[in-house]
Amino acid sequence: MALQCGIVGLPNVGKSTLFNCLSNAKAQAANFPFCTIEPNVGVITVPDERLTKLAELVNPRQIVPTTVEIVDIAGLVKGASKGEGLGNKFLANIRETDAILHVLRCFENDNITHVDGSINPVRDKEIIDTELQLKDLETVESRINKVQKQAQTGGDKQAKIVYDILLRYREALMQGKSARTVVLDKAEQPYVKDLFLLTDKPVMYICNVDEASAATGNAYVEAVREAVKDENAEILVVAAATESDIAELETYEERQEFLEAAGLEESGVARLIRSAYKLLNLQTYFTAGVQEVRAWTFHRGWKAPQCAGVIHTDFEKGFIRAEVIKYDDFVTLGSETACKEAGKMAVEGKEYVVQDGDIMHFRFNV
């Protein structure tokens, strides 16, 4: 399930430094704009203590965590919607991602130049928002021109629904609001799914701070919080330069000592990966046996056959039933056998909605 989060932001806000911390794929990090031209893709392991605990109990031959893809995209500048800088490439790359990690510079450093000459994360956010909104407005206007006649003159009900939604999008975008602020009901969503609007993607704002502000934030972070208070968006505070130093340490003990000295319980990278996973509306179920203990990714709300299909399409096609053990029961009782004996293994059918942390065994026939 190759779902991607795209790291975006103005040049020199710390995108590539953050990406380097997240991935073994090393994006060039340099003090000039556009040091990242082609998008770098990193496959990132999602930290999950439950996987470690299950492995301790089962003692498998191998442990396989779940992953998410992070894409480092070229820095955007004012005028990108009209092709300025690397605008066209930026917009094409971000359109292919499933969610946006918007990095905002919230630190002072005279040695790292800002493309606009001063530090103002709210202004930076608005620059990118405006460029994405302008591009979306272009997309919406184009679609309106195609469906307007059908919607207004004929009996095409579908065209009328699409047209009405497009008008709502246009109104929001012309007011400087993102498409995600337009609330659609479930029946409406399929009609405009193929628009792939940039500002309709889920977003998380990453405030890149200095080491002193990593635990508590700063005035810049508070300004961002105020600016996005009406958006359905998460804010994460990370010190990318500090995370880079942590990533260079060789042992787990050294990294923990560093975190404790900085007043942090865990690394910002670990929080970011988990938050990105959540942003994509993903959850995890597990399979646990002596061959391997493995985490599997699925979309929140999926039923048992769909989740079986994550392992292999044949599992979904020939689905018979799922044997389910809750994570807490497995950890408390210590084994699959003990859970069976205690009546803690449920047999579920095709309508079962899989829950985060479920330990699954699928029965199928093809």
Image (spheres, helix red, strand yellow):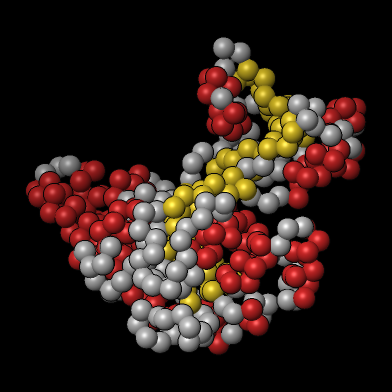
Residue 167 position, x and y percent, is 23, 61
Corner quadrant of residue 182: bottom left
- Against 46, residue 342 (above or below) is above
Q: How many marks?
A: 0
- Answer yes or no: is residue 135 visible: yes
- Against 26, residue 79 (above or below) is below
Q: Is residue 123 left or right of residue 223?
A: left
- Answer yes or no: is residue 202 visible: no
Residue 274 position, x and y percent, is 62, 56
Q: Nearer the viewer, residue 90 or 298?
A: 90
Residue 43 position, x and y percent, is 54, 47
Q: Is residue 14 left or right of residue 350?
A: left
- Quadrant position of the C terminus in the picture: top right
User: Residue at (48%, 87%) from the top-left corner?
Assistant: 110
Residue 150 position, x and y percent, is 12, 46
- Against 323, residue 199 (above or below) is below
Corner quadrant of residue 138: bottom left
Q: Is residue 143 left or right of residue 8?
A: left
User: Residue at (22%, 56%) from the top-left corner?
Assistant: 139
User: Residue at (37%, 86%) from the top-left corner?
Assistant: 117
Seen as rendered, the residue at the extreme top is 366
Q: Nearer the viewer, residue 245 or 9?
A: 245
Q: Nearer the viewer, residue 148 or 33?
A: 33
User: Residue at (74%, 33%) from the top-left corner?
Assistant: 62
